[in-house]
Amino acid sequence: KAVFTDLDGTLLNHDDYSYADALPAIEFLRNNHIPLILVSSKTRAEMADLCRELSITDPYVCENGSVIVLPKPWVAEFGVDTESLAEQSDCYLAYRGADRAAILSILKPLKSQFQFAGFSDMDVADVIDCTGLSEPAAMNAMRRDATEPLLWHSDGALLEQFAQFLGESKLQLLKGGRFYHVMAQCDKGDAVRYLLNIYQSHIGARVRSIALGDSQNDLKMLKAVDQAVVMPHPDGSYMSDKDLKGELHAPYMGAKGWRAGVEQALLQL
Ligand code: 2M8
Ligand code: MG
Ligand code: MG
């Protein structure tokens, strides 16, 4: 078994980013040697801190599937071929996204046509203001490799046209909890399949998988697993999609709902 999870609005509360209510389920997974793979829009810097806090030693997926971090002990344990990976001091990186500088240069000329504010237009105080993150967390969120989150200020009707322009440059627009993310045409689903393949070829059997998420950027991840768990939004609504099948609805928002969702999903597998 393996559990893949989004962070904001899923494992972490939407408003205060707390995971405290989820800890019993995290502990249960650890005690039962079930990998817990964090799959988020967050950056490597943000996610490395969180994995340290939660003592997670499994791989994790950053910036909506753009960067997969494979810790060195894990790479050794699973006999991963490192040829196409970028080596760092304590991990290997699988890059699947676009370079952020390239994304910013594609966005620049679009500013005359559309009104939006990206993280690159903001200072730390602005990021704190629109996310509610602490100062060190906001600084980590600004250290981005492969995606640009933005707030849309033009008419919502223009989003489709904006996305079309991005498509012509092989980029896409994905909706997260608070921001639209401009990024390459990769997603959380590809990253989940990549990791499931490694697990499955190592143990030589099918791994039964669970994924939890709340937003549109989680859809492909939710479709890539055996049991999807959809988290409620702050207004109580659940994301729906015609291609989702047999998904569970977590009964509460954030960390508390995450714990209940994991417990229910494990019973379904
Ligand atoms: C951004 O991501 C969330 C996740 O869905 C969003 O779009 O609302 C990212 O910039 C991430 O790095 C940051 O930590 C988060 C803070 O709310 O916002
Ligand atoms: Mg989310
Ligand atoms: Mg997310």
Image: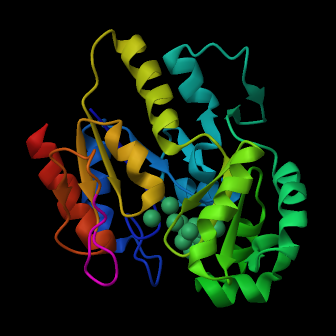
Count of numbered badges drawn on the protein: 0
Main secondary structure of the magenta stretch: loop
Residue 41 vs 80, above or below: the answer is below
Quarter where residue 200 is shown: top left
In the image, residue 26 lies at what x, y percent? 32, 54
Q: Residue at x 24, y 69 (%)?
A: 257
Residue 43 appears in the figure? no
Quarter where residue 107 is shown: bottom right
Residue 269 vs 126, above or below: the answer is above
In the image, residue 125 lies at what x, y percent? 77, 89
Q: Residue at x 48, y 55 (%)?
A: 217
Q: Give left or right: position of 113 versus 4.
A: right
In the image, residue 90 lies at what x, y percent? 71, 36
Q: Nearer the viewer, residue 244 or 26?
A: 244
Residue that extends furthest to the top in the rendered view of this protein: 204
Segment colored magenta: 232-240
Verify whether residue 94 appears in magenta. Answer: no
Residue 238 appears in the figure? yes
In the image, residue 260 lies at what x, y percent? 18, 63
Quarter where residue 150 is shown: bottom right
Q: Nearer the viewer, residue 109 or 44?
A: 109
Q: Residue at x 84, y 77 (%)?
A: 121
Quadrant of the rendering where the N terminus is positioned = top left
